[in-house]
Amino acid sequence: EWIYRALKNHPTCLDHSFVGIVSRAVEGETASGIKFGSASGMLYKSIPGPIRSAYAVPYMVSEIQDYNKRYFIAARLALAKRVSYIGTPNPSTLIRLAETATRNTEAILRAIHDGTLGVDISNQLDVETCLARSLKPDPKRAKNLDKIVERRGELRLPDCWPDLCLIGCWLGGSVGTQARKLASYYGEVPMRDIGFLASEGHFTLPFQDQNPSGILSLNNNYYEFIPEKDLDSTNPLVLSSNELEEGTNYGVLLTTPGGLYRYDINDIVQVTGFFRNTPLLMFLRKGRDMTNITGEKMHVNHLLLALEKVKRLYDLSLVEQFRIVANIEWQRYEIYIELKDNISHAILRDQVIPEIDLALAQVNVEYAEKRRSQRLILPCLHLMPRGWGESELKKSSQVNRKDAQYKWRILCPESRLEDSKAVLQTITCDDPYKSLLRSI
């Protein structure tokens, strides 16, 4: 249905090759031997062969273990083709792809000319053999791309893919910031949201370009909604889809053919309008106790588990109070911390921040994936004045008169103005893209 509607507006989007970048369909096994992995990878592998053959970047690229080599080969294979459509859930993936192409132009053009992959992945011989099998020298394409570089001074993707007429990716929520940057890499190509979807199901059908809203997929599942203001209530108001109001935010309860019953997917959506009485929904963010910058889905329990690991190395009794904030613009987690005593800034920068980063990667596999692929950068520390935590408690009790019920927010989806103003000093690592200290 999504493709059908896209073709109505962009009839040439499937005329040439497609670029689709996915994660691995199988990323590991549970203790009981059940395989788990990426929904995007599973969907890719289920595509019929004739359609799959039109993809410029085959699934096997997602199996390359080294992220730099994975993106290099993806860019090399994509640039060898005439591309009319690009589709991948996360826009940060497309930014990384474009930056890889720009940084490695000479090596990519040489690989296209010679008919090679361009990098050594002989440690994964099965992957190398599979990908190399279809390659042939293409001096003509390499020469055309080289002319673009000579004319423009750099490899510009809009010039490489003049037939590109549609990009499909998420446009709303936390990744919307990244989506808005795509024009500087791909030109003014129409973009269409791929829909509010997750491993639990596909919930909306976007039908307009540059619009993150989509028609609620009533035939796929049964949906119930709780107004955001009632989410913490012991007896919340639960509404059906025909009772929703435009401009209101809701949490979603999901009942699916797969067996989920009134399942709280912990997402917040907004009703942006109606299509023939069916609500148009836009994903806003993850719900309570969870943040999401670029797909890592960080829960407050991940943070607590990570801090338990760090406790074994450092005396965390020196920490009076802390709060962690997801900075979408900088693509990193920022830790606001009040210390009881002074600690060397060099130790905080060179030891504590990398250890926190490593601990988060150990307890959250998605965080580890996003760090390895450099879609998230290292966390930073904001040093707060002494009395910061106590001051907030006093302000809250003056307003609510219920200091016994006050709950400190450990994890926040965005920074608070009063916290930002109170920062004494910010500590960051010299290289924000520094790899994890050791393998996970």
Image (cartoon, rainbow, N blue to C red):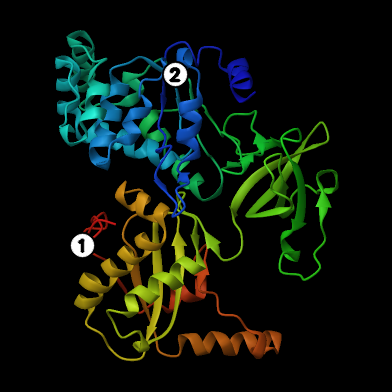
For disc 2, the marked residue is: 52
| Residue at the image point whose x is 67% and y is 41% from the top | 258
The label shown at residue 19 is none
Position of 88 relative to 56 (above/below): below
Q: What residue type is labelled 2?
A: Arg
Helix, strand or loop under label 2: helix
User: Quadrant location of the C terminus?
Assistant: bottom left
Sequence order check, earlier mark of 1 and 2: 2
Helix, strand or loop under label 1: loop
| Residue at the image point whose x is 31% and y is 91% from the top | 341
- Whether residue 189 is visible here, answered yes or no, is no
Image x and y of residue 383, in percent = 35, 78
Image x and y of residue 336, in percent = 41, 75
Image x and y of residue 32, in percent = 47, 52
User: Quadrant location of the N terminus?
Assistant: top right
> Among all residues in the image, which is located at the extreme right?
243
For disc 1, the marked residue is: 430
